[in-house]
Image: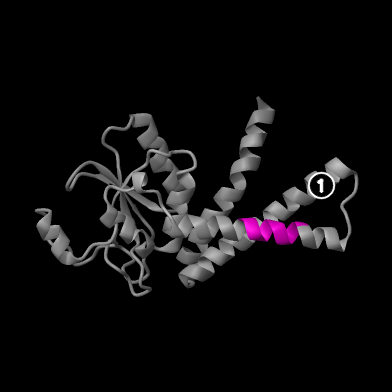
């Protein structure tokens, strides 16, 4: 049982460091979105380099020279950049409520995009129901207009909130999804509005008390 737990930690820790590290840099140091993402990537690169060096040594019996280390590092960095690039640029049509939401995906903060793209590896049926809004959208939904909303574009040009469908999904899956985002450092609310959903947001320094 212990070996299984250790395996789970080893496999999930890089993803946790990538996302949680990016959120931490954004929240605590107010860096630009791309800098927060690059920082999380760099932390993950260091961790995976340690993994790779350790396993390489265990398999071959030696750590290898400088050239071998450079080759491993180059391949690892390419994989990480490809993973992050794919995660922030693409989402499947089955994971969005409508084509309009798909077109709004790139308006989300890159760290928020990476967070949802990563959980899609485990929850392939997740559906984003809303992202980018303007004040008039609330009136069209029969809700009072909000002056402060993280669904609005912030000064960095990105939307800091999205809604994820909870209807038609089991309670355990919704519970685990909620705590995934919480553990990654995002704000999570469950409310109705135009339907039961999880409201996931990343803190905005323009509106520090908004959700």
Q: Dot 1, crowdedness within 10 Å: few (<14), some or many (≥20)?
A: some
Residue at screen point 67% across, 28% down:
2
Image quadrant containing the C terminus: bottom left
How are the colours assigned in the image?
Answer: one colour
Verify whether residue 123 appears in magenta.
no
| Magenta stretch: dominant secondary structure | helix
Rendered view: 195 above or below 38: above
Residue at screen point 88% across, 44% down:
60
Point out the residue furthest to the top here: 1
* Residue 201 place in picture, x, y as percent: 35, 56
Image quadrant containing the N terminus: top right
Give left or right: position of 183 versus 165.
right
Label total for image: 1
Residue at screen point 46% across, 59% down:
88
* The residue stretch that appears in magenta: 72-79
Residue 203 found in image quarter: bottom left
* Residue 57 place in picture, x, y as percent: 85, 46
Determine whether the residue tagged by mark 1 lies in a helix, strand or loop: helix
Residue occupied by mark 1: 56
Seen from the viewer's position, the closer of residues 51 and 72 is: 72
Give left or right: position of 185 versus 57.
left
* Residue 65 place in picture, x, y as percent: 89, 59
Residue at screen point 78% across, 60% down:
71
Rendered view: 60 above or below 89: above
């Amino acid at each position: 049982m212990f070996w299984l737990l250790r395996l789970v930690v080893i496999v999930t820790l890089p993803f946790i460091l990538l996302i949680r590290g990016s959120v931490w840099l954004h929240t605590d140091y107010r860096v630009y979105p791309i800098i927060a993402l690059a920082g999380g990537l760099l932390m993950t690169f260091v961790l995976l380099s340690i993994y790779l060096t350790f396993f390489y040594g265990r398999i071959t019996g030696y750590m290898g020279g400088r050239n071998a280390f450079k080759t491993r590092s180059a391949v690892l960095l390419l994989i990480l950049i490809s993973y992050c690039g794919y995660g922030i640029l693409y989402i499947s049509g089955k994971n969005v409520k409508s084509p309009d939401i798909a077109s709004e995906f790139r308006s989300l903060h890159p760290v928020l995009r990476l967070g949802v793209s990563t959980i899609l590896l485990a929850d392939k049926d997740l559906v984003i129901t809303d992202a980018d809004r303007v004040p008039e959208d609330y009136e069209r939904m029969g809700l009072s207009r909000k002056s402060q909303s993280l669904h609005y574009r912030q000064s960095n040009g990105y939307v800091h909130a999205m809604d994820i469908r909870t209807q038609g999904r089991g309670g355990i899956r919704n519970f685990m999804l909620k705590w995934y985002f919480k553990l990654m450092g995002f704000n999570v609310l469950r409310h109705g509005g135009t339907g039961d959903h999880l409201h996931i947001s990343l803190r905005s320094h323009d509106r520090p008390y908004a959700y």
